[in-house]
Image (spheres, rainbow, N blue to C red):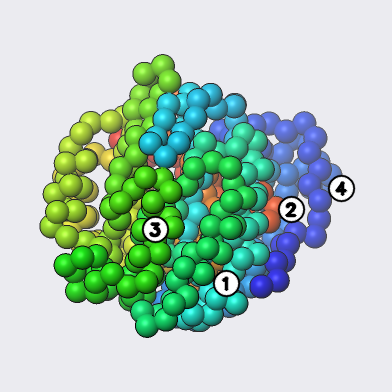
Amino acid sequence: MKERSPFAASVCIGHLACVGGVFAGAASCNGASSAQIHGAPGGDGGADSPGQSGGQSGIPRGAVVYDGGAAVEGAVGPDGGAVSRLYFAVVGDTRPVAMDDTAGYPTAVISKIYGTMDALVPRPSFAVSTGDYQYTSTLGDQAPAQVDLYLAARAGYRGVLFPAMGNHECTGLTASNCGAGNADGTPGAYRAYLTKLLAPIGQTSPYYEVDVNAKDGAWTSKFVFIAGNAWTSDEEAWFDRALTRTTTYTFVVRHEGSNATAAPGVTPSERVLALHPYTLAICGHTHTYDHPSRREVIVGNGGAPLSSSTKGYGFAVVSQQPGGSIAVDMIDYASGLADPRFRFELNPDGSSAE
């Protein structure tokens, strides 16, 4: 797949005012804001159907240089960790257009995403992914090869990655349900997810929790990863217990958004969510980025065929602000520029901080 940079102009950075982690242009280059730049239109496609797989970007005119703020002290590993502030990246949905088309895997896009992520200053402490690392048939043997391509690209980012399971880690159907005892069993895609993505971080179950807390004890956070396509009553009980434990911040990572009710785990997990406080639900499945409701974000533009003609490939960055709120920005995969029309902030309880 040919990688295309969406920007023809260079960014002139003069005396810029940094507002909430994003530069607002205070100088000018040839009469334009010093942080402004022209974006190009993106591709088009669908979440569960073939579409264009080109790497064009739809970051709009006025995109700004992203500044991650102060350095983060501490570290996060496979077992979680303790840091001076929350600062992490989100990427989702990386697969070829056609089933078993391993040769058409979007390697250029996902490699650039992880390389751009790693080059941010400061580098995000860790990353989470929202699922779909492959597009393979249950009768074929391409799952290990496609996940290996993903892992080779992921190696461009030096932090730990916490992956969620997608429907393409089952049969590919949104309504599929994998795992021992479930209707769709344990196909190659599911096994590849467990052995190649989860085992390296010490996880044996498709659903799990990771805690990241403050070095000075000022706040706590938990990341609860749901397997909406390996759903059982045991998982539902586990999810309810996980959310019952009080933390300052709670992030729930699930592949399908709240409107994808065909997925076995969406409706029951939404019932559980309604009973507990949480900060943000991080989802993918739709091949774009979106903020469909106050405390749900969609990050599904990691190389799969795009479902929006105005939004391109990239990743999100979630950063804890000095006052305790959480800011979410969307970063273009090739340029590292942020989309200023997307940014939003939430308080720890999920209420708007804007």
CA gap between label 1 and label 4 equals: 40 Å
CA gap between label 1 and label 2 equals: 30 Å
Which numbered tag is attached to residue 105? 1
From the viewer's perspective, tell me whether residue 319 is left or right of residue 180.
Answer: right
Q: Relative to the observer, which residue lies in front, 185 or 210?
A: 185
Mark 1 or mark 3: which comes first in sequence? 1
Element type at marker 3? helix
CA gap between label 1 and label 3 equals: 20 Å
Which numbered tag is attached to residue 248? none
Provide the residue designation for mark 3: 195
Disc 3 marks a residue whose amino acid type is: Thr
Q: If the image is split into quadrants, where does the N terminus sit?
A: bottom right
Of labels 4 and 3, the one closer to you: 3
Disc 2 marks a residue whose amino acid type is: Ile
Element type at marker 1? loop
What is the x, y in percent for residue 324?
42, 27
What residue sits 74% from the left and 53% below the top? 37
What is the x, y in percent for residue 112?
65, 57
What is the x, y in percent for residue 323?
45, 25
Marks 3/2 in contact by CB < 8 Å: the verdict is no
CA gap between label 3 and label 2 equals: 43 Å
Which numbered tag is attached to residue 37? 2
Can you see residue 245? yes
CA gap between label 2 and label 4 equals: 12 Å
Mark 1 or mark 2: which comes first in sequence? 2
Can you see residue 331? no
Mark 2 or mark 4: which comes first in sequence? 4
Which numbered tag is attached to residue 30? 4
